Image (cartoon, grey):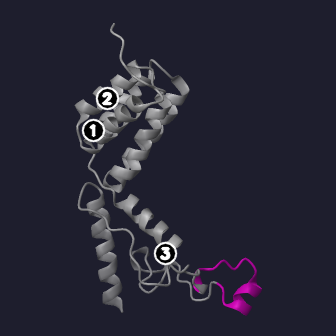
């Protein structure tokens, strides 16, 4: 067997993992499994690879295929428990799954936008009706939880008038790919229902 050039702490390490991630993101299972094999043959820590698969499952697939995060979590757990050489099978299955899954970064974009908002904009106080009132006096004296509408008491399990943020902001915009198209349709239906009831 020929020796594979690979600097585990240097440029080759970062170049190979970059190619691996970009191949999964770009929906190329052949390239993804090649870069996986290249890293494994060179002695890369399989747990490092499993962590990158898990990050990609949320960042680049998200709710377009909610099973991706389950596959990634299982792959990480199995990789930790059994190690090499057997975990090569698990990592290959997971990498191929990620490459073949529909893609969406909408969840990642949502949390990045919300994080930016929290760090750079005025902090939004928790609306009074959403505040916790573990003691009856808090509800009576300060109005905590007063006016909260329990979702399950309403048609479709959603309150038509409940405000959960206190300001008019939107962070999550689902795509029309994979399962996320169903989420988009559900959210669109909820908005239409709210507008109809008002």
Q: Residues within 10 Å of mark 2 (few under 14, many from 20)?
A: many
Q: Residue at x 27, y 69 (%)?
A: 185
Region in magenta: 129-144
Q: Is residue 141 magenta?
A: yes
13 to 165, vertically: above or below: above
Are the residues at dot 1 and dot 3 in contact (C-beta closer than 8 Å)? no
User: Which residue shows up at 62% across the image and 84% down it?
Assistant: 145
Gap in angstroms between the C-alphas marked 1 and 2 = 8 Å
- Residue extending farthest top: 1
According to the picture, the residue beneath numbered tag 2 turns out to be 35
The disc at residue 133 is none
- Is 186 included in the stretch rendered in magenta? no
Image location (x, y in percent) of residue 176 = 23, 61
Residue in front for this viewpoint, 162 or 100? 100
* Mark 3, other Cα within 10 Å: few <14 / some 14–19 / many ≥20: few
Q: CA distance from mark 2 to mark 3?
A: 49 Å
In the rendered image, which residue does mark 1 sit on?
23
Task: Residue 152: give its label.
Answer: 3
Callouts 1 and 2 close, C-beta under 8 Å: yes
Secondary-structure class at tag 2: helix
Residue 167 vs residue 13, the one in the foreground: 13
Callout 1: 10 Å neighbours few (<14), some, many (20+)?
many
Residue 75, can we see it? no
Q: State which mark lies toward you, 2 or 3.
A: 2
Badge 1 marks a residue whose secondary structure is helix
How far is disc 1 from disc 3 in space, using C-alphas? 43 Å
Q: Is residue 125 above or below residue 97?
A: below
């Amino acid at each position: 067997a020929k020796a594979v050039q690979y600097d585990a702490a240097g440029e080759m390490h970062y170049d190979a993992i970059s190619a691996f991630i970009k191949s999964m993101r770009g929906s190329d299972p052949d390239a993804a499994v090649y870069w996986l094999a290249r890293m494994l043959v060179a002695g890369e820590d399989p747990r490092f690879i499993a962590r990158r698969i898990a990050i990609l499952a949320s960042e680049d697939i998200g709710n377009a295929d909610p099973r991706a995060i389950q596959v990634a979590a299982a792959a990480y757990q199995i990789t930790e428990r059994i190690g090499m050489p057997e975990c090569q099978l698990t990592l290959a299955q997971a990498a191929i799954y990620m490459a073949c899954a529909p893609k969406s970064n909408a969840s990642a974009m949502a949390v990045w936008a919300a994080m930016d908002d929290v760090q750079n904009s005025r902090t939004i106080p928790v609306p009074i009706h959403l505040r916790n009132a573990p003691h009856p006096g808090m509800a009576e004296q300060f109005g905590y939880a007063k006016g909260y509408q329990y979702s399950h008491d309403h048609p479709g399990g959603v309150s038509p008038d409940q405000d959960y943020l206190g300001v008019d902001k939107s962070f999550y915009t689902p795509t029309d790919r994979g399962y996320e198209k169903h989420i988009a349709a559900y959210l669109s239906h909820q908005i239409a229902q709210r507008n109809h009831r008002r």
